Image (tube, grey):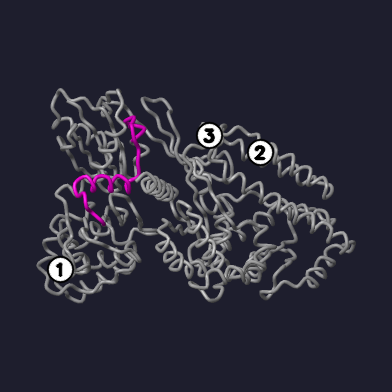
């Protein structure tokens, strides 16, 4: 969220409204106005849009994905217009394709002073920022289970994000990154005596939005589990295109074409995690996520071949938190039993 | 004499077991939870107390089941563990070579696969409670039959009716339709038992290799009809232990024995006032549903809060 805010606030004169944190209220708004059987990301983003419109936004930006998410923008625009909101809708991915020229035209319409040169510069800075944030997140995920003071990692992360929005140039950003990297390294941590490694794969939105997955990463961290997750913003924006061919080659025993969204990527990662002898794999998706449903039997097969335990979570608005905790606890017990045999 | 207490608080029933040093059961009890785990446990413990010898020293208390956290706090348990692990530990104690545990309880159903005494894989029913004990008991009420007689009646049927197995709501409308068309009660009951089995195997058991020996437990395992249809569907023998309904409590009692400390627990929780209050936290837009717990009028803990604000 921060890099996008940074980018837009630098290339446009307009005031940018930061979307509020996703909460129960967001979800309720989303569920109320969404088709019943649509997947959770649609409901979350629609809820966020409504909250932003209430805050006074009049321009909304929607990106897209490789599954039915690609058509969400059109549907959400219709729903919001029907609700009586007045706004301009910028769809970065229309008809399943990204058209840079068209986006430029649209941005020009909003702001006449819009300069392509300047925006290219800031696009590069923002993309760098995404990369740095993902790197820090990666470190947090591996170490948060061992933090000495509860919440110290998350509060430092908040501080870092605030500092990032004030970055002036490439160099300044780099300096900030190094500074916070050092700070994270210096945070007091417990000794890692029994360390289990768990990989998390699955549908991208559920993976990346902590509210949508009931803060599962934090829940795992409480058990002192180090977590590896490949899907992050940088991967989705810049790496996915180049890596998909490699992934397909590596998993040619299991799949012969990409199955939409992140399904093929997840099959490849699952195989990689198994080969790297990870202690367990957690697969998450929102209910009715078709690409991931297609991937699940293949994941099952891979895990059986390599004898690595895997559990599946399917999140919806109604899943109770206690049930999830029970399953995680049992999963942890299982990993521990397997290790101590 | 040393004793170890295991309590399994499920959605429908609450189970309690006291084991001695040699892991034999010296007291056990099985009562309905009736939607109030606190008072159920208080009743349970007073029932257990009557069975126990007077010189007993409780050296460990374990809680499991869906209300394990709340009751664990109430009885000051030495171990609080999920029901999957507890069931596996309990079953492996009595059936050393078990490879598959089928479990159907009041609100959830699970399958646990075991290899060489280690949990290899498990699955639990996901979003809905289709095909569990609570469905059976509500349908028994509709048909005006005692749940306890359900299994015996099912076994008398030669021609079980077909009932949709996928979803409880569909199953119920199927059942009503079949009853109105005029099928005899025993065939409907048998069809219901069969649908539970099919639902289980297609849902939790999907993609799992079910190997012998198979142990079936949980409250529903007392239903002979369901056992019969499991054996028919799996085409092997299914073991039902005489203590199959207590297995979770036995497992957690065994685990509490492993955690043994010097502490001696007293069992007079029945006299302590233990109160829970549910509210909606207004600290932030998250609006967590929180439960505040009071022991003797003093606030001791809060459940359900996502952040620090709710715990005050």
Q: Nearer the viewer, mark 3 or mark 2?
A: 3
Q: Are marks 3 and 2 in contact (CB under 8 Å)?
A: no
Instruction: Please give the residue where the numbered disc 2 appears in the rendered image.
Output: A184
Q: SS of the residue at dot 1?
A: helix
Q: Residues within 10 Å of mark 2 (few under 14, many from 20)?
A: some
Chain under label 3?
A
Q: Are marks 1 and 3 in contact (CB under 8 Å)?
A: no
Is residue B146 on the magenta stretch? no
The mark total stands at 3
Instruction: Please give the residue where the numbered disc 3 appears in the rendered image.
Output: A191
Magenta stretch in the rendered image:
B72-99
Callouts 1 and 3 on one subunit: no
Q: Residues within 10 Å of mark 3 (few under 14, many from 20)?
A: few
Residue B298 rendering spot, x and y as whole percentages? 41, 25
User: Residue shown at 70%/70% (left/top)?
Assistant: A93
Chain under label 1?
B
Q: Nearer the viewer, mark 1 or mark 2?
A: 2
Chain under label 2?
A
In which image quadrant can residue B220 be found? bottom left
Instruction: Please give the residue where the numbered disc 1 appears in the rendered image.
Output: B185
In which image quadrant can residue B28 be found? top left
Whether residue A32 appears in this view of the structure is: no
Is residue B73 on the magenta stretch? yes
- In the rendered image, the vertical position of residue A181 relative to residue B98, given as above or below: above
Q: SS of the residue at dot 3?
A: loop
- In the rendered image, the vertical position of residue A20 relative to residue A241, given as above or below: above
Q: Residues within 10 Å of mark 1 (few under 14, many from 20)?
A: some
- In the rendered image, the vertical position of residue B58 relative to residue A292, given as above or below: above
Q: SS of the residue at dot 2?
A: helix
Q: Nearer the viewer, mark 1 or mark 3?
A: 3
Between the C-alphas of marks 3 and 2, the distance is 16 Å
């Amino acid at each position: 969220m921060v890099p996008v805010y940074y980018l837009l606030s630098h290339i446009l004169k307009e005031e940018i409204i930061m979307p509020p944190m996703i909460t129960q209220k967001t979800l309720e708004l989303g569920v109320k106005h969404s088709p019943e059987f649509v997947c959770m990301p649609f409901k979350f983003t629609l809820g966020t849009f409504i909250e932003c419109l209430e805050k006074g936004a009049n321009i909304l930006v929607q990106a897209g994905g490789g599954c039915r998410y690609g058509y969400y923008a059109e549907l959400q625009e219709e729903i919001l217009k029907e609700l009586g909101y007045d706004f301009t809708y910028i769809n970065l991915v229309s008809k399943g394709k990204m058209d840079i020229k068209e986006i430029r035209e649209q941005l020009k319409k909003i702001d006449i002073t819009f300069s392509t040169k300047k925006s290219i510069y800031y696009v590069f800075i923002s993309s760098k920022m995404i990369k740095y944030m993902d790197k820090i997140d990666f470190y947090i995920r591996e170490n948060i289970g061992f933090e000495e003071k509860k919440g110290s990692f998350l509060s430092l992360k908040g501080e870092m994000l605030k500092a990032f929005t004030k970055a002036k140039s490439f160099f300044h950003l780099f300096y900030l990154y190094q500074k916070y990297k050092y700070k994270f390294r210096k945070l007091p941590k417990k000794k890692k005596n029994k360390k289990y490694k768990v990989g998390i794969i699955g549908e991208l939105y559920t993976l990346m939005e902590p509210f949508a997955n009931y803060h599962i990463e934090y829940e795992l961290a409480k058990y002192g589990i180090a977590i590896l997750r490949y899907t992050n913003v940088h991967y989705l924006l810049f790496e996915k295109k180049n890596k998909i061919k490699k992934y397909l080659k590596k998993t040619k025993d299991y799949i012969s074409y990409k199955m939409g969204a992140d399904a093929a990527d997840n099959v490849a990662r699952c195989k990689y995690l198994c080969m790297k002898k990870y202690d367990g794999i957690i697969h998450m998706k929102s209910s009715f996520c078709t690409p991931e449903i297609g991937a699940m039997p293949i994941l099952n097969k891979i895990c059986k071949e390599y004898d690595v335990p895997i559990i599946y979570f399917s999140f919806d608005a109604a899943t109770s938190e206690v049930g999830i905790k029970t399953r995680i606890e049992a999963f942890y017990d299982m990993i521990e039993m397997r290790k101590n045999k | 004499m040393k004793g170890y207490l295991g309590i399994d608080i499920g959605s429908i029933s609450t189970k309690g077991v006291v084991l001695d040093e040699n892991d034999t059961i010296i007291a056990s009890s099985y009562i309905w939870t009736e939607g109030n785990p606190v008072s159920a446990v208080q009743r349970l413990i007073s029932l257990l107390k009557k069975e126990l010898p007077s010189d007993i020293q409780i050296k460990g208390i374990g809680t499991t089941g869906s209300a394990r956290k709340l009751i664990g706090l109430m009885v000051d348990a030495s171990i609080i563990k999920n029901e999957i692990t507890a069931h596996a530990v309990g079953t492996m104690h009595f059936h050393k070579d078990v490879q598959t545990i089928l479990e159907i309880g009041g609100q959830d159903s699970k399958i646990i696969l075991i290899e060489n005494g280690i949990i290899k894989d498990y699955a639990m029913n996901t979003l809905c409670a289709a095909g569990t004990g609570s469905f059976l008991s509500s349908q028994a009420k509709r048909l005006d039959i005692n749940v306890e007689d359900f299994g015996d009646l099912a076994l008398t049927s030669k021609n079980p009716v077909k009932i949709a197995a996928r979803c409880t709501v569909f199953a119920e409308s199927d059942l009503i339709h079949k009853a109105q068309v005029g099928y005899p009660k025993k065939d409907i009951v048998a069809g219901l038992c069969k649908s539970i089995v099919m639902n289980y195997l297609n849902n939790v058991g999907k993609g799992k290799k079910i190997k012998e020996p198979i142990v079936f437990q949980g409250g529903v395992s007392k239903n002979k009809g369901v056992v019969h249809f499991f054996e028919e569907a799996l085409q092997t023998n299914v073991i039902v232990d005489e203590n199959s309904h207590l297995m979770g409590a036995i497992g957690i009692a065994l685990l509490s024995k492993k955690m043994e400390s010097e502490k001696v627990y007293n069992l007079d929780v029945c006299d302590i006032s233990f109160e829970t209050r549910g509210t909606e936290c207004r600290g932030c837009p998250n609006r967590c549903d929180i439960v505040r717990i009071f022991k003797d009028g003093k606030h001791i803990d809060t459940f359900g809060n996502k952040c620090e604000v709710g715990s005050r």
